[in-house]
Amino acid sequence: MNSIPRVLIFLALLLPFFTTTVYSQQDPKEIARQYMEQAELIMAETKAMDDARELMVTAADQDTTFIKANYEAGHMHLLTVGKDRAVKYFMRVFRQDPAYRFDIEYLIGRSYQYGENFDKALEFYNLYKQKLAGKPNYQGKDKIDLPTVDRAIFECENGKEFVASPGNFSIVNIGREINSEYEDYAPVLNENEDEIVFTTRRREDNLNENVFEDNKPYEDIFIAKKTGGTWSYAKNLGPVVNTPYHESSVALSADGNTLFIFNDEGGGDIFYSERQPGGEFSAKIPLPGIINSSFEEKSISISKDEKTLYFSSNRPGGFGGLDIYKATKDSKGEWTNVKNLGPKINTEMDDDGLFIDYDDVTLFFSSKGRKGMGGFDVFKATLDPKTNEWSEPVNLGYPINTPDDDIYFVITKDAKRAYYSSVREDGMGYTDIYMITIPEGIKNTEPVVTKPPIEPTQPTDTTTTPVVVVAQKTPTKTGLQPLKYLVSVVDAVDQTTPLPAKVKLQGARDNVIVPFTPLGDGVFEFNITSDKPKDYRLSVEVEGYVFQNLNIRLEGASKQGKTINRTVAMRKLVAGVTSILRNIYFDFDKATFKTESYTELNKLEAMLSQNQNIIMEIAGHTDAVGTKEYNKYLSVRRAQAVKDYLTKKGINTRRIKAVGYGKSKPLASNDDERGGRELNRRVEFKVLQN
């Protein structure tokens, strides 16, 4: 295993910024070339793709005709984060030289798929299929074979179907106490749901001073406890369990006393650690019996009575990729009688991230096969104890599943909550841990039988046979008609030009998504079936315009039915335009973000990333409580906190000016809290140049 001192990568990354003054006097094409050289140097010496990506993006935006830089910027996005942003760079390549890469249409389709723009993805996938048909003998390394493309088309058709019928799931970020700006994943909880163990690659409290070859810390296992409904800040489990290399939590016994750990030794093996009388965990020991092999054993789950173990492995004899297996404990305490769960569960693709429910018959797992919408999707299957046969796995549907990886799903004893790892718009960094809530209970969610999509060509494997998905909707009470909420998106200048927007309406507190129908010409129809008034957040995004996150309150369904019309006027990102970031919240008297701030922060970062010429001012404002000097100090700190967040995400620090105005620019009277001081405590941005 390789360890890289952090300082070496850090110095390499600083080089372009040391030469900023020189670059500013040069031609943009020369600037782009030098940034690209630095990116290639990093990739030649390490696998620090995140660091190289930001340099490639800078090179591509300095010179939009630099085809290699634009291709690599898109490629690196697909390999890391912001996969939907790759479209911008691949399209530059496609427009200038469609022959640069044989698979360029396929790559554009992939990026559109990750962005849930399934119609555009299908357009480019089918363009690529036409290219394949026209050159059947092409054998270059940049060829994507037909079954892979057909699988992607199948996923997009599934995605359109799932998104059209979102489940009544509340999916909420578990919070800053657990998640960080780095990868946080693989949550496991005890039966009482008052202790969580998970895996993270954060720098803070990581035991290793060095980094892995990708310039990120090694995996460490962290733990947190819940008291009075609130999680404590997570802390490192300590050097007895964690080593200078990778460790990942994979399972926790119901009583919380046995922790199962993945370690990448021996191709990837499973260990366990017992909790000691003082509460600490012992040194890890390999699982006894025949679970571990010379191949990879990755995820496991143990039954409540601790006599049955389910695990994933890519050992020979399976159906392809990672398969799920079952083992039982013998009288000696060793795991034996290992059996593959068979084709009802396993596919030719990876099946992983499994969890056996407390009832010992319901299995949740993630699969890259079956009726999915891309990456790992979470499925549910049930064992019939009489026949020992598994039911057909059911996709848990949207928004639990997305075109990216959704995995490591674990459920609570009462089946009303679940935790898993996902990449979502309110994430704090990379992969975050989320809590899913549904009043009816996830196990009791009624599946909806749907028609399978018509595929251009039928995939040859057996991984797409199920046609049952979970789409738990909130029913409208008898005699009530849904409230129709019609949203029209127009340009703010003439108030009539419709805009092709990305819109979303969801509960302000629970994130439950309201289904909608696009009516064309920038008009979207949302149907509210709940009979009670509720607070919502309407999100509207248009490329080249200021995004809007609007907090609204809507009444529910009624006997008469009702239609509410709302026009959202979008302002272009021109110099002088300002916008208040209403949904950024700070701790009292501090410059630390609350968990609910990250959706707004991420939209701001996305807007800056998509519009590389923007230079903006981030301004902090306070109410009139406190001294002038202190309010100025606090407002500067809060503006700087926003800037720091954006620069950590890769936005060039020279594009953002952080200032604090204290209480000098109120929007309303400071005499009252609501409608007064509350409005004055704000962060806003102003476009200085575009």
Image (cartoon, rainbow, N blue to C red):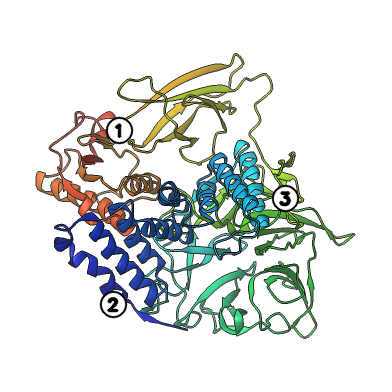
Q: Position of residue 70 (x, y in %)?
A: 38, 55
Residue at point 30% right, 33% down? 572
- Regarding residue 585, the answer to whether it shows in the image is no
In the rendered image of this protein, does residue 397 appear above or below residue 17? above
425 vs 647, left or right, is right
Secondary structure under the numbered disc 3 in the rendered image? strand
Residue at point 62% right, 20% down? 481
Q: Are marks 1 and 2 in contact (CB under 8 Å)?
A: no
Quadrant in which the C terminus appears:
top left
Residue at point 32% right, 36% down? 546
Badge 1 or badge 2: first in the primary sequence:
2
* Residue under pointer 1: 572
User: Which residue is outermost to the right?
Assistant: 387
Which amino acid type is marked by label 3? Answer: Val
Secondary structure under the numbered disc 2 in the rendered image? helix
* Residue under pointer 2: 7
Q: Quadrant of residue 215?
A: bottom left
Tell me the number on the disc at residue 544: none
Say few, some or many: other residues with alpha carbon within 10 Å of mark 3 (under 14 / 14 to 19 / 20 or more). Answer: many
35, 682: nearer the viewer:
35
* Residue under pointer 3: 394
Q: Position of residue 251 (x, y in %)?
A: 61, 69
Q: CA distance from mark 1 to mark 3?
A: 44 Å
Q: CA distance from mark 1 to mark 2?
A: 41 Å
Badge 2 or badge 3: first in the primary sequence:
2
401, 138: nearer the viewer:
138
335 vs 182, left or right, is right
